[in-house]
Image (cartoon, helix red, strand yellow):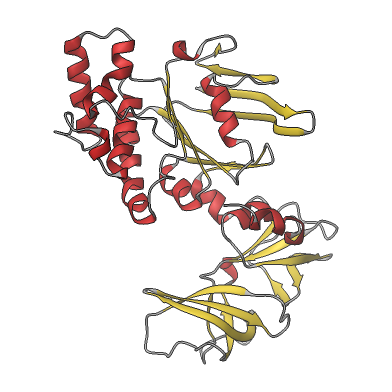
Amino acid sequence: MLEIAGISKRFAPDKVVLDRVSLAVPDGEIACLLGPSGCGKTTLLRIVAGLETADAGTVQFDGVDLSGVPVHLRRFGLMFQDYALFPHMTVARNVAFGLRMAGWSPAQVQTQVDAMLELVNLRGYGRRTVDALSGGEQQRVALARTLAPSPRLVMLDEPLANLDRLLREELVDELRTILRRIGVTTIFVTHDQEEAFALSDRVVVLRAGRIEQDGAPQDVYRQPANAFVAGFLGFHNLLPAVLAADDSRQVSTPLGDWLLPHAAQDGSPDRAYSLLIRPDAARLLDDSTPPDAPRIAGRVSAATFRGSVYRMALTPAADPARSLSFDLSTSGDRPLPAIGEEVVLVLDETGMVLVAGDVRNVMSETMSAP
């Protein structure tokens, strides 16, 4: 197990990068450090690797304090964002580099290089030069080189950031399959929410050097810890909300008063909240709609057809300065609303989630995130 306890780091007296961060990663788990640029996630990775020194706190692995343990004796594998491959070497020599430095015999090196290239689906690529490879192939070579010495812990810093969107989507499942196959404990850093959900067993959301939420991907998605996490995950339908004093399910928002399906946890009318409305929680009003169902009336200000969904921006009639985004299903025969059309959307209460914090206080920060 990797145990990070109370890690703090400053790069200047007034620039706190990490503030008493604590985290435990069990054996074999794939954990993601997710957050905007400058939140401290890469610095934390470098401290675990031994490339940076913490001002306070400890890092332990298998119960051993790593303070003073040099990088090469930690037996951790670190894959950099730019891959750091040697362009003058072949693929096989790149993968073999760490093994030769560790004193492996030529026969052992050859066997391990072949096994690693097979693992990353590059069998037969050993004699090719790095310059002759595509970006995705270079990424696989870098991963093979990282895994070749059989590290106790693998650390990946934005492993897919240099690839185009289509290739990233293709490789994300392959990367998880490879990491699952070898069963090594892994920490990877990203600011891409979809990448984090697809790759990890656990998501750790950081903000300004502190952990905002730590949990399974599905739990973080279903119940963001606060308005910052919800906004950073890409949920833009966030409304300032006030709980009723006599009913912790009743909320008041600029667009109306609604009854939530569940009572708010630790609910208090004196606390600041935001109501998250998921983009798939709306449908067009029809004759089957119950009269007491929550709804929003407004005008369609933008729309794009995206295959299975029709992404629509709505300007609410009750708050024309606001814009909400919804994904309507394209199945069925009913015509989809056009830009400029007035519509009434019915909301599914299960897609409405109350989160702590006033969205107005974190909007500028989430909007500046990558």
Whether residue 253 sits left or right of residue 349 in the image: it is right
Whether residue 102 sits left or right of residue 210 in the image: it is left
Q: Residue furthest front?
A: 88
Q: Which residue is at 60% across, 12% downward?
A: 67
Q: Which residue is at 16% across, 29% downward?
A: 127
Q: Position of residue 216 (x, y in %)?
A: 51, 44
Q: Position of residue 179 (x, y in %)?
A: 34, 34
32 versus 333 height, above or below: above
Q: Quadrant of residue 140?
A: top left
Total number of numbered labels?
Answer: 0
Q: Which is nearer the eye, 120 or 228?
A: 120
Q: Which is nearer the eye, 286 or 55?
A: 55
Q: Which residue is at 56% across, 34% downward?
A: 42
Q: Position of residue 173 (x, y in %)?
A: 33, 46
Q: Which residue is at 46% across, 48% downward?
A: 197
Q: Which is nearer the eye, 208 or 286?
A: 208
290 versus 209 height, above or below: below
Q: Position of residue 139 (x, y in %)?
A: 33, 38
